[in-house]
Image (cartoon, grey):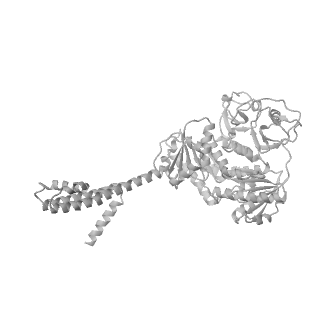
Amino acid sequence: MQRLAQRLYYLTETLLTRGPFYQLMLVAGVILALSVGGGVLVHLTNPHAYSNTPEAIWWAFLRLTDPGYLGDDQGLYPRLVSTFLTIAGYVVFLGALVALMTNWLDRMMNFLASGRSPIFEEGHVLIIGWNDRLHALIEEIVHTAQRAGEDGNRAIVVLCDPYEPSMVRELSQKLDPEVRKRCRLLVRSGDPLEVESLERVDFAYARSIIMVATSSADRSQRSLSDITQAKVLMSMKAHAPSPKRVPRVVVEVAFTGNKLLVESVGWGKSTEAVVADDIMGRLFCQAVRFPGISRVYHRMLTDTFSDSITLKGAQDLGVVGLTLREIVTSLKDGTPIGLLHQGEEQSDLELLKLDETIEENDRVVMITSREPRSAKEAPPPNWQLPLHPESRAEHRILVLGWSTDLQVFLDELSAYPGESYQVSLIWEHARPRERERLERLAENRSNLSLNFQQGALLDAAELARTDIREFDKILLLADQNQQPLVADAENVLRYVLLERHIASLQHKLDLVVELNDEDNRPLLKGTCPDILMTAEILSHLLAQVSTHRSLMWIYEELFTNGGTELRLRPLSTLPPEGASFAECQAACLAADAVALGFMRGHEVLLNPPADLVLKSGDQLILVEME
């Protein structure tokens, strides 16, 4: 008997765990059993009241489902059975049924909120992955579409794992209200390594796919992230329904060695890998070499302004048959700096080839602004600009904090043979492996020497023990092991302590500070340091490259040692009365360089009016050959 009871309990439990349908069938079976039992019992005890058993069963079912029939019964036994059936109806029919429906509805709502329903979009932007700068990336995507003249609410789909509904609310709160109006944000849950998850976000019909890396400073985690990106890309390529229609794919990778690997497993010309450490390391290097150039980067590499690098067809501009030198001063759309030829491969990109004839299918690389500039030609002046001034031979740099960008930063510094760098690095925690890698790098660089220290970066006493007067430049790096807002808070405090200490010593230093969130930028006052917004810059690059992969080659060319570089040059040799920007542009063209604008104090102006007068003390923003 006990065995039979256990078996019945087991069968009941199995049915209840198999889903709402079986649970509903179990409740229906109980209702049927009660109706049959009650009907047979009342028919046996009162055979004259009901002509047959089916009628008695129907009587029992009505009492079970509706308590309003309770007062219509006559006789002791019918009333007892009716009372029992009414109470059982409250428990089984109403209680169990409502509980089942509520439970099913709750599961259905949780399923819908879990982001597992498929989408049906075409021409949407798909972001695979989740990190702390996702809101900046979405804002850059929307603003890039605005600059391209695209109207309407574009769908931006995010595929991430793990996923919680609260993540969407937090992401929406971080977005600018205007951005929320101009896009439809859809978040879906799923592992991108699973084909089902990729099909859920309609990857084959996306206009562009952006694969972001995991935010981690751990080398093994970042390496695993690169491998995962390659596997996801291979899976998308293998399961794409049509090889003729492929989306543009931008993949963020951690290591330079994985760049070619990721691009080789993708869709060839439609796939571009972006190495975040390479970009930021090079920008840190240029910010140290040219104080103030970070303000130019802020104009060109964030969505705060409308200055950006664009590609425009030669036919649309009406410049076919002309040379780049001829159109630099005549175009009103912006300042041209190079050409991308018909093949649209990296070898087809040529910057500062000023005397090359522009062909019909070429694209012109331009620096554009919100307002069109006034074009005006001027004859070369009888004075010369110092386009290649001699820089200081020796530099002493203090680096506070550790970052994965350090390897590229130091490598880029040592790539300038005419300059010597002595770099002191203060880390809060010992990092023997990272120190060994950097020491191996310095062993092969005769113009680079490293000194490692360990100390509390937020301790004023520890800072006072470091002789700041030995250095001429200081770089403050945000801690990648912290949340972005926490890392920014720590870096702001370091800056405040350092700025006070420098003021007490009455010593002039060039400061470069790394931040993640644009809202923290106003907190850095005082000496007005160079500020590099890591999250904003990387998001801008990913959004830009998703529109055309060749933009990545242009950024690499402008920010990397050798070839064409973006630089600042002081205008110390101008006549006392100054000179117009058109005259400065003519002087630059005579030296095979192109002026983009100028910086006066802390104000940056790109594509200025041709008749605007520049004075001694201004700095010219130009593109020139190394």
Please name the residue shown 85% across and 57% down the image: 506
Seen in the image, is 503 located left or right of residue 52? right
Residue 125 seen in the figure: yes
For this rendering, which residue is in front, 162 or 347?
A: 162
Seen in the image, is 100 located left or right of residue 325? left
Please tell me in which quadrant of the rendered image residue 220 appears.
Answer: bottom right
Seen in the image, is 569 located left or right of residue 340? right
Image x and y of residue 320, in percent: 70, 28
Name the quadrant of the C terminus: top right
Q: Is residue 581 above or below residue 440?
A: above
The number of callouts visible is 0
Please name the residue shown 57% across and 50% down the image: 173
Please tell me in which quadrant of the rendered image residue 554 appears.
Answer: top right
Image x and y of residue 234, in percent: 55, 49
Residue 128 seen in the figure: no
Image x and y of residue 74, in percent: 15, 58
Seen in the image, is 573 located left or right of residue 298? right
Image x and y of residue 458, in percent: 72, 63
Please name the residue shown 87% across and 42% down the image: 572
- Check the image and name the residue furthest to the front: 71
